[in-house]
Amino acid sequence: MTVPGSPIPGADGPSSAVNPSPGSREAKVTAGTAPYVTRPTRWTRFTRTFVPWQLWRFARINMKMIRIIRSSRT
């Protein structure tokens, strides 16, 4: 049902909603149906899998948290 002069899609009632409800199958977007999905670069994949890099980041972030906590307690 379309109301004349209704420029907004779905404005003529709940039965004519443009987007389906979030629980329906049509609302799900997967990697195969998405118009553009970024893929990780070689460097990104390297940093995600290289254990020494992960250990360095872990230590660096933890030292930063310790410094912030110590400075807040003085």
Image (cartoon, rainbow, N blue to C red):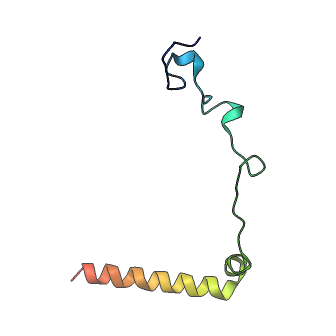
* Quarter of the image that includes the N terminus: top right
Viewer-nearest residue: 67 or 49: 49
Residue 40 quadrant? bottom right
Tell me where residue 12 appears, x and y as whole percent. 51, 16
Q: Is the residue 9 above or below the residue 41 in the image?
A: above
Image point 60% across, 30% down: which residue? 19
Viewer-nearest residue: 13 or 46: 13
Q: Is the residue 57 above or below the residue 3 in the image?
A: below
Tell me where residue 52 appears, x and y as whole percent. 66, 88
Image point 44% across, 86% down: which residue? 63
Residue 71 quadrant? bottom left
Q: In the image, is 38 to the left or to the right of 67?
A: right
- In the image as oriented, which residue stretches furthest toward the left? 74
- In the image as oriented, which residue stretches furthest toward the front? 5
Q: Is the residue 48 above or below the residue 2 in the image?
A: below
Q: In the image, is 30 to the left or to the right of 63?
A: right
Q: Is the residue 41 above or below the residue 21 in the image?
A: below
Tell me where residue 74 appears, x and y as whole percent. 21, 83
Image point 60% across, 85% down: which residue? 55
**Picture mark count:** 0
Tell me where residue 10 appears, x and y as whole percent. 54, 23
